[in-house]
């Protein structure tokens, strides 16, 4: 199968032919982080010593490479994923959080697969934001243009992969927090079907919407990482994805979004639709007015669930939280049950509309964000970044963003969505698109 310049495969090949040692690889990644992080602020904590120790230990286990799909691969994990013995700060102040008693299951699976966790990635506080701005750790910058933000809340994860600090990173996605930074930084990011990945040891924002997800430079690498996180080897791409997509019916969604899509992104989307016309059985055009309700429905759900999730720590240690997030939690706690339940009804209506689209399509395609990354000091409203991602969070659908080109000199992503449980189909479609555009 054709694999588009997979950084992971290149590393594994180097390890196999002994042209590269694990310690050399990890050492160079650490040096790269130390050199670039002052400008990008992508990494909150560099786990240099422990990463080098693990590299040396794995070097003695080369005979196990065939059994460890991420053997010696450097990975960054978001600051809201537990590692035993490290405080689970989730973007809060340095003194926040008690040391975790155990690794999150997804972190443990990385280690079991042979990965080397080299860093904890910076993020919006509590994952409550979409621009990578954090009052405690600073503003994460976009490697494509350091004057702009990288999107969030998995800001550091997206920036770290885009800048080659690591080939793989783990983020989390509630309203779009994997897909947004991946799109704005020009890499691949996927929100899997809700519930596919275990959530233990991952600090919550809104549990009914939260999920972890992979970020990588290629779809093949994202699929490999997801297969490890989910303990589902079948999700790794092993056959030509074009054969899968050839039988698919595709709906290209246009218009009827909560915001207007920038003309440059619309032009890139038209080109992407042309690519899919050559890949799939059919491509129809459609709009769905219910998608405009997605952001409105998500607000009270996220606000209420976040306030509930963090109430004990917020009451006990209000000084651990920044002013903006403290305001969100305070407002969330004041949301009345009737408003939350009305939001749930609105959410259900959005999901019914999307499910109806899937009665005549296997895949939905649309832009990931309505605009490209904006200046870090003046990001503007959040709605243009999450309006096109949050409707699919509400229904727990698998959705991936893959680069579709640049406008204004900045990357824009194509979002591909499938019905719940069809994660393999989303990956195949994204890989086929990636191959066609290479």
Image (cartoon, grey):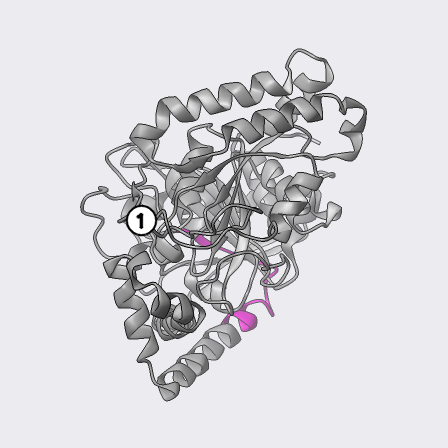
Residue 321 can be seen in this image: no
Mark 1 lies on residue? 131
Residue 2 picture location, percent across and down: 66, 30
Q: Which residues are magenta?
A: 354-368
Q: Nearer the viewer, residue 114 or 265?
A: 114
Whether 411 is drawn above or below 81: the answer is above
Whether 212 is drawn above or below 74: the answer is below
Give the left or right position of residue 415, taking residue 255 as reference: right
The residue sitting at 58% across, 55% down in the picture is 192
Which quarter of the rendering shows the N terminus? top right
Residue 236 can be seen in this image: yes
Whether 133 is drawn above or below 252: the answer is above
Q: Nearer the viewer, residue 165 or 276?
A: 165
Question: For residue 294, which quarter of the picture?
Answer: bottom left
Residue 161 picture location, percent across and down: 47, 34
Q: Nearer the viewer, residue 160 or 252?
A: 160
Residue 46 picture location, percent across and down: 45, 33
Residue at the limit of the structure toward the right, as seen here:
63
Residue 305 picture location, percent across and down: 43, 72
Q: Residues within 10 Å of mark 1 (few under 14, many from 20)?
A: many
**Residue at disc 1, secondary structure:** loop
């Amino acid at each position: 199968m054709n694999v588009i310049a997979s950084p992971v495969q290149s590393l594994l090949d180097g390890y196999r032919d002994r042209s590269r040692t694990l310690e050399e690889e990890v050492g160079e990644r650490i040096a790269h982080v130390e050199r670039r992080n002052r400008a990008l602020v992508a990494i909150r904590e560099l786990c240099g010593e422990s990463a080098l120790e693990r590299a040396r230990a794995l070097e003695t286990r080369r005979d196990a490479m065939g059994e460890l799909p991420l053997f010696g691969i450097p990975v960054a994990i978001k600051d809201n994923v537990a590692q035993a013995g490290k405080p689970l700060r989730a973007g809060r102040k340095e003194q926040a959080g008690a040391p975790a008693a155990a690794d999150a299951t997804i972190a443990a699976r990385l280690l079991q697969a042979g990965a080397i966790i080299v860093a904890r990635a910076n993020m919006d506080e509590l994952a409550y934001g979409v621009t990578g701005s954090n009052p405690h750790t600073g503003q994460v910058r976009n490697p494509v243009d350091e004057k702009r933000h990288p999107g969030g809340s998995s800001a550091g994860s997206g920036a770290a992969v885009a800048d080659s600090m690591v080939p793989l990173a783990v983020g989390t996605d509630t309203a779009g927090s994997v897909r947004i930074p991946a799109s704005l930084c020009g890499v691949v990011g996927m929100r899997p079907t809700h519930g596919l990945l275990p959530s233990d040891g991952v600090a919550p924002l809104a549990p009914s919407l939260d999920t972890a997800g992979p970020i990588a430079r290629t779809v093949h690498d994202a699929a490999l990482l997801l297969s490890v996180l989910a303990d589902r080897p079948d999700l790794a791409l092993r056959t030509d994805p074009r054969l899968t997509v050839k039988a698919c019916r595709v709906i290209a969604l246009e218009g009827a979004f909560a915001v207007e899509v920038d003309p440059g992104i619309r032009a890139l989307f038209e080109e992407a639709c042309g690519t899919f016309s050559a890949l799939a059985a059919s491509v129809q055009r459609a709009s769905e007015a219910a998608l405009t309700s997605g952001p409105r429905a998500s607000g009270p759900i996220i606000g209420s669930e976040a306030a509930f999730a963090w109430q004990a720590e917020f009451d006990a240690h209000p000084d651990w939280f920044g002013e903006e997030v403290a305001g969100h939690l305070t407002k969330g706690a004041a949301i009345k049950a009737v408003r939350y339940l009305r939001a749930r009804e609105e959410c259900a209506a959005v999901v019914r509309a999307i499910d109806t689209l899937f009665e005549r399509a296997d895949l939905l395609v649309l832009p990931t964000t309505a605009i490209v990354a904006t200046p870090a000091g003046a990001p503007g409203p959040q709605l243009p970044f999450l309006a096109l991602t949050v409707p699919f969070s509400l229904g727990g659908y698998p959705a991936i963003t893959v680069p579709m080109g640049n406008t204004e000199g900045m990357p824009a992503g194509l979002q591909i969505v499938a019905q719940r449980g069809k994660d393999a189909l989303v990956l195949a479609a994204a890989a086929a698109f990636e191959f066609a555009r290479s």
